[in-house]
Each structure stands twice: as structure tokens, then as C-alpha cells.
Image (tube, rainbow, N blue to C red):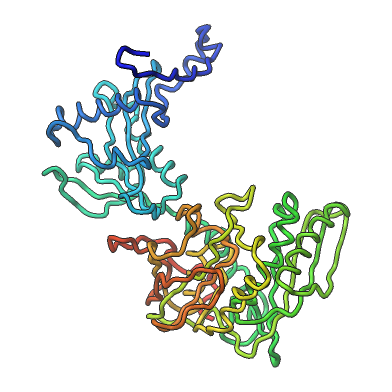
Amino acid sequence: MYLDGSTTVPRPERAQDILALLGDRSTLARQPAFLIEDTPGKRESSAYRRLRRDTFVHEQGLFAGHDLDDRDEDPRTLVLVARDRDGTVVGGVRLGPVDDSPDLGWWVGGRLVVAPGARGPAGIGAALVRAACARAEAEGALRFDATVQTRNRPLFGRLGWETVREVVVANTPHVLMRWPIRRIAAQAAATKAPLGPLLRPLPGPPLQGPRGYLGDDGAPVPNTDVIAACDAIVPSMVERDPEWAGWCSVLVNVNDLAAMGAAPVGLLDAVGAKDAAHARRILAGLGRAARAYDVPVLGGHTQLGVPAALSVTALGRTGHPVPGGGGQPGHAVRLTADLGGGWRAGHRGRQWDSSTHRRTDELRAMTAAVAVARPAAAKDVSMAGIAGTLGMLAEASGCGAVLDVAAVPRPGGASMGDWLTCFPGFGMLTADEPGAPRLPAGPAVGAVCGELTTGQGVGLRWPDGEITEAVTGPVTGMGTA
């Protein structure tokens, strides 16, 4: 303890490389010239701030006295520092949400600094920028901006940043630049892009159902009021989380029927498992979900001694099927989602479990909502996520879409990046005339959060009016329904 009563917390000792301590030449040659890490304490934070003051106040004269601002006091602000081999802080950068409002996935980086003696071919500045980009994406950011001094524009351009526009900061020319985050587009490409090319070579039309329902969540059976839907569960999930896989096999099929306004009447299952014990766990989850949704299992097929597999077919009925491609430019987009529950253990950031704690009447209210409201178009949020599924609805409707990020209903425990790309349990996207009634979906929360537009793809609209591209073109390649 110091004389003023303050204390220090000893920093954990770093693990030492024995060969390096012994002076092994090849080991020493492989040691990096610097390391980048979070600021672990006040000492490192103070060193970073001293570098900033020396550079931005004394060397460049951008600020008078100091360069501190409100962002330095925001507890959400992260600071990455670069240390040389002696542990000295030789550079740093800060990043975090744009202001003190809820984190919408719009982050900004800044105060990039490198000590004068460390500048040059070592590439510390570039490494800090790359690390900041990776960290922002890991924190769920979908937009990452930086205001860069004009002389540093070439560096950021070489690293893949895009110029937005020229601005002036502290009476000095700067450039607003943006790191392109392609998380949504990559997910849509991985999960849905192969569908059009895959189905197009088939003899005859790729789908034989009635016109206007191409690529829908379910298929109207011609000359009947029956809707058929079928989903297969990812085999790796069936293998390692069989009860949840069984539950989801019911959930996704009932949601597919719900998106078309159909009431479920029965299920058929096809189960593959390595042994009877594994099959029993799959069927236990499936059975619990069937009871919760009050849908009978009519029959199916079970095979043992094979790799894990699960597929369920659902049958429903409606006299007025709602298409996924019934939207038009100018229609308002509404997301209705169950925000209760939390991340499924082992699937954090990818699968939101909102259904296993719900009563049957609550589940029935949600799955009957489209049938009651009868919007122009509806799609159940699939593994393409909210933004990717909106792209599918827009593609089937022959138009594009814009999503207002700040208006998207979202649970407090999910970052925007995770929420727009996860499977949300119950999530329904609908399009209809502005002012159309909301979906009466019981415990689910709904809000108008975008609109269909001319063109194609999906844009994200931010509170400052900027629109960034989430999906640049068609999602499936199957075209208009």
C-alpha cells in the first residue's frame, strides 16, 4: 500500500518460453516483434493515453491540453495495445459503440497511435487496425467506422477499408472510412445461395406446386386445402444434442406451416441413430415438442446402426395460404419474435431457445397469428437469419428491402450481429400495406422495422440515415415466386 492509501494488484506472470530463456537461436528468431492485447490495467491504459497526448497534442497539434472525450469514460469502450518484446506499450487503438444509447451493432474505432520509435516496417499500426476489425466483429458489430487523417487513407485502403466521404476534425482534413462487415451476406451465401443453381437443372419446373409459392416455407397440395412442409435437422446437432434436435424438428415444421397461415394436423418423422439409446433421446425431444404444440405424430420411420439423421414432415390445413412472395415495393416489413428465453447451451450466438418454457396456449397463439392477420406475405425466419430471410421474402416478391436496425425487436442478451443471423426460435417476417394490423401473437413482440423497395438485396438503415449493404443481390437465385 502506498502512502496515499492506494493499492496495486499484481499482474499475473506471463508463461516463459524455456528455450527462449536458454537463448535458443531458432526460438528467438521466431519471437514476434510485438504482441497486441486488451489493456489489462491502469498502467497500460495510462501508457496508451500518454502516447495519444504526445502524438495528437504535442506532435500534431490537433488538440489543446489533452485529447480525452466522453468515449474514454464509456465502460463499453475497448482499448487494444501493442507491446514490444520488453513489455513496453508502443501503440494502441480504441473501439466501441458510437454513443451512450443501446448498442445497435454500430461501432467506431479511433485514436490509433504508434510511438515514434516504433513506426515503420514493423507494421504495428496496420496490425492494430486489423485487430480492431476482428474484435468489433467478434462483439457483434455490423457497422464499423473510423475517421482517419487523410494521410492515413492509403494504409486503411490497403487493409480493405472503404472510403465514405471527406470530413473535417479539429480543423484538419479527415476521411470517414468503413470496414466492410459481410457476416450477413456470408451466412446467406452459405445456407441459401446454392438452391437456385441446384434446383434449376431438374427436369421440368423445380417445384411442382401452384404458381406463386416458389420457395415457400410449405407447399400447397394441388386441389386440396392441405399444406405440406418438411425439414431436416443438421446431422451434427442430432449427434451431439439429440433432445434439442428432436424439439427443433417439430418447432421448425410448425413454424413453416404457421408462415403460410396453416393449422398443423400431424407429423411424420424419419430418424437415423447409431443405437437405440441415441434414437430414444431424439424421440424424447420430438415427443415433448409434439405435446407442447399439441400436434400428433402420425407415424414415421426409424433406422438404427447408421449416422445420426432426423427429418420431419408436417401437414396442415388452410383455405387461404399466405405466400412468401406476396410483397410489393412500399409494403411495410414487420418482425414478430418471441424474445423470451435465452441462448441454447452449446449454441450461443446461433440458436435462441424461446419455446421450451412456453405453455401450449402461448405456442398456439404465436403459430396462429399469420392465419388471423393474413398479411400480403410472410416467411418464418430460417437458418439464413432475420436479414437473410428478409432477403428471401424480398426476392420471392421481386423487390429489395431495407431493415431499420434501431426498430428491430431484440432481446437484451443478444448482440445485433448475433440476433440478425441466429435462428430465433419463433420469428416471423411479414409484409403488408402500411398501417396493416399487427400479428396477434400472444407473448411474441412485433414492430414495423423496414419496408420493401424497388431493386434487390437487403440494406441496413442506421439512426444517422446511412444505409449499409447486408445482402447485395438475390439470396437463393430461385427468382420471383
Residue found at the far bottom of this picture: 223
Above or below 364: residue 271: above
Above or below 258: residue 6: above
In this rendering, would 10 be left or right of 200?
left
Quick one: 299 or 99, which is closer to the camera?
Answer: 99
In this rendering, would 26 be left or right of 399?
right
Q: Quadrant of the C terminus?
A: bottom right
Q: Position of residue 401 (x, y in %)?
A: 41, 71
Q: Position of residue 445 (x, y in %)?
A: 50, 68
In this rendering, would 398 be left or right of 232?
left
Above or below 72: residue 42: above
Residue found at the far top of this picture: 22
In this rendering, would 181 be left or right of 219?
left
Which residue is at 37% across, 27% downward? 82
Q: Name the quadrant containing residue 225.
A: bottom right
Q: Position of residue 397 (x, y in %)?
A: 48, 79
Which residue is at 41% across, 54% downward? 142
Q: Position of residue 460 (x, y in %)?
A: 38, 63
Which residue is at 26% across, 54% downward? 164
Q: Quadrant of the N terminus?
A: top left
